[in-house]
Image (cartoon, helix red, strand yellow):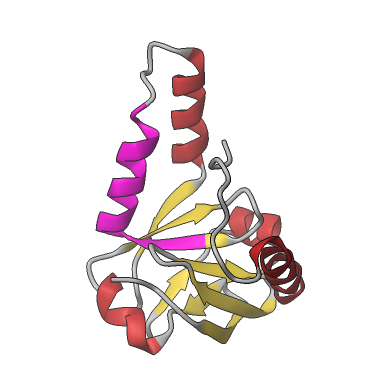
Amino acid sequence: MGFRGIYDHTVDDRGRVAIPARYRQEFLTGAVVWLSREGSVQVYTTAGFEEKSNREASISDTFLNGRRSRRRFDALSFDAELDRQGRILLPQRFREAAELRGPVVISGCRECLEIWNPAKWDEELEASQEQGEGFPTEQAPEE
């Protein structure tokens, strides 16, 4: 499943946000939210997150950077479930770090959904468009 599109939603007073209706079926068995380095909260299917986790764990834990990578990765992830209205609860720490209050933008990012503060989303979208006019660039992945 590839997640696509841009959706306007709202984080309610209890920290819940609705998953776009077209993707709710994908999260019926659960979700994992992860705080990204760019300042969004990413929402993965359980299977999608396991794939990401396995890639992250490919660095041996016999090396300091491998152990630190696992700590950072696992500490910044949280299991979530859809409620009857198709919402997930975002941990308060994640909401504060990503500045998610009231209106939010949910964007498809192929393997996950990203939940953004609208002002941060505008900045990120502008930077992304400036980088490559919407096309991939020949650049090494960020560490």
The magenta region covers 42-58
- Is 99 in the magenta? no
Q: Quadrant of the C terminus?
A: top right
In the figure, 69 relative to 129: above or below? above
Badge count: 0
The quadrant holding residue 134 is bottom right
- Is 46 in the magenta? yes
In the figure, 43 relative to 85: above or below? above
The residue at the point 52 percent across, 64 percent down is: 90
Task: From the image, give the main secondary structure of the stretch colored magenta.
Answer: helix
The residue at the point 34 percent across, 29 percent down is: 58
Q: Position of residue 86 (x, y in %)?
A: 37, 82
Q: Position of residue 71 (x, y in %)?
A: 48, 30
Left or right, residue 134 beside residue 18: right
In the figure, 55 relative to 105: above or below? above
Outermost residue on the front side: it is: 138
Q: Quadrant of the N terminus?
A: bottom left
